[in-house]
Amino acid sequence: MKSKFNITSLVRESVRNLKPYSSARDEYVSDGSAMIFLDANENPFENGVNRYPDPYQRRLKGVLAQQKHTSEKNILLGNGSDEVLDLIFRAFCEPNEDNVITLPPTYGMYKVLAGINAVENREVLLTKDFEPNVAEILNNVGDKTKLIFICSPNNPTGNAFSKEKIQQLLEAFDGLVVIDEAYIDFCQKESWLNSLNKYHNLVVTQTLSKAYGMAGIRLGICYASEEIITVLNKIKPPYNVNQLTQQRAMDCLLNQARVQDEVEIILEERNSLIEVLQTLDFVEETYNTDANFVLVRMDDANRRYQEFLDQHVVVRNRSGQPLCENTLRFTVGTPEENKKLKAILKEMK
Ligand SMILES: *Cc1c(COP(=O)(O)O)cnc(C)c1O
């Protein structure tokens, strides 16, 4: 294992030496005065989107920094968290040389991104109670291990991992620990965002795609040390978050009450769905969840999946994932949708 966390030695050589593309809007930053912009070959006739967007999304980051009690310097925004995760691979993992550790059953994108970037993906299964196997993870860490991906609350199992286990990894591993908190807004446990100052190797990703109800605009958020954010800013496409997304995200962030109300309803509906699931003979286990979905072990997941489809309900069959034989994952819908789902469940034999 590497002796000490060092951001410079962690970054790929090509990235370390890179002089980033400088866009017109990098060189000139508006101070709010009325200016004539003849620097970016845009069409000058106003239509709301004729200008390039702010490459650093300063207003949006300002609001996020304030709401999350952090600094704009600790934030990078991307075209969904999928782009953020890809940037992390590209900044830190040398193709055909470095490796990462992921913890199946988990979010499928880590493996896909490892494949795209030609980075070895060392898979260390969760334990039977869906917790990270810390000893086995550390056994798999080598000189070339750059990243460990931790999804908490985890997709598809639904549970948030124990704080102690994540802490052990943050303390023992000298590469980056990336904690994917896509579902954190449904979860009672504290976000790891509040530990950024304590762990220099911590990266937290969040998204507007789930609780915030904005999957369509594609906005992913990365929180990390200023050093890490500086590296990611160097390699990101200059205009990776478009103007419409920045505007809609801003409106959304400034209306927290709507998000809170919806999360509350979703959690109530989730709990009433779980109550019904637990009464059914063909349901073998309903797993604990800290998210807006629930993983359920069925008598025969393939058969039940088809039966739901026949009733015009699409669920996710996770049976192909390790430790998830015969499981279906149910996302919680609106109260009306949930009522229909519960009625269908009760009719099933
Ligand atoms: C849905 C999900 C995301 C969201 O990705 P976006 O690109 O931001 O939409 C990220 N991580 C996990 C684990 C998810 O389930």
Image (spheres, rainbow, N blue to C red):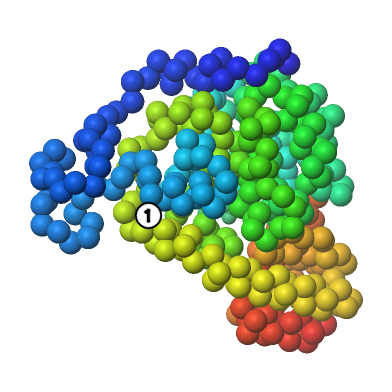
Q: Quadrant of residue 136?
A: top right
Amino acid at pointer 1: Gln
Q: Position of residue 133 (x, y in %)?
A: 83, 36
Q: Is residue 315 above or below residue 5?
A: below
Q: Crowding near pointer 1: few (<14 within 10 Å), some, many (20+)?
A: many
Point out the residue furthest to the top here: 3
Numbered disc 1: secondary structure? helix
Picture residue at 24% right of the left edge, 31% below the top: 27
Determine whether, in the image, residue 238 is placed left or right of residue 223.
Answer: left
Q: Is residue 260 left or right of residue 290?
A: left
Residue 160 at what x, y percent from top left? 75, 51
Q: Count all numbered tags in the image, as a single digit.
A: 1
Residue closer to the observer: 8 or 100: 8
Quarter occupied by residue 225: top right
Q: Is residue 26 above or below residue 273?
A: above
Residue closest to the eye, 318 or 146: 146
From where the camera sits, is residue 248 visible?
yes
Residue occupying image coordinates x 56% and y 14%? 9
Residue drawn at 74 percent across, 64 percent down = 294
Observer-nearest residue: 227 or 267?
Answer: 227
Please state the horizontal and vertical placement of residue 169, each as a whole percent of the image. 76, 31
Left or right of residue 343, residue 74 in this image: left
Seen from the viewer's position, the closer of residues 218 and 101 is 218
Above or below: residue 271 compared with residue 46? below
Q: Is residue 115 visible?
A: no
Q: Quadrant of the C terminus?
A: bottom right
- Left/right of residue 270 with respect to residue 45 in the rendered view: right
Q: Quadrant of the N terminus?
A: top right
Q: Residue at x 74, y 58 (%)?
A: 188
In x, y percent, where is residue 242? Answer: 33, 51
Q: Which residue is mark 1?
A: 246
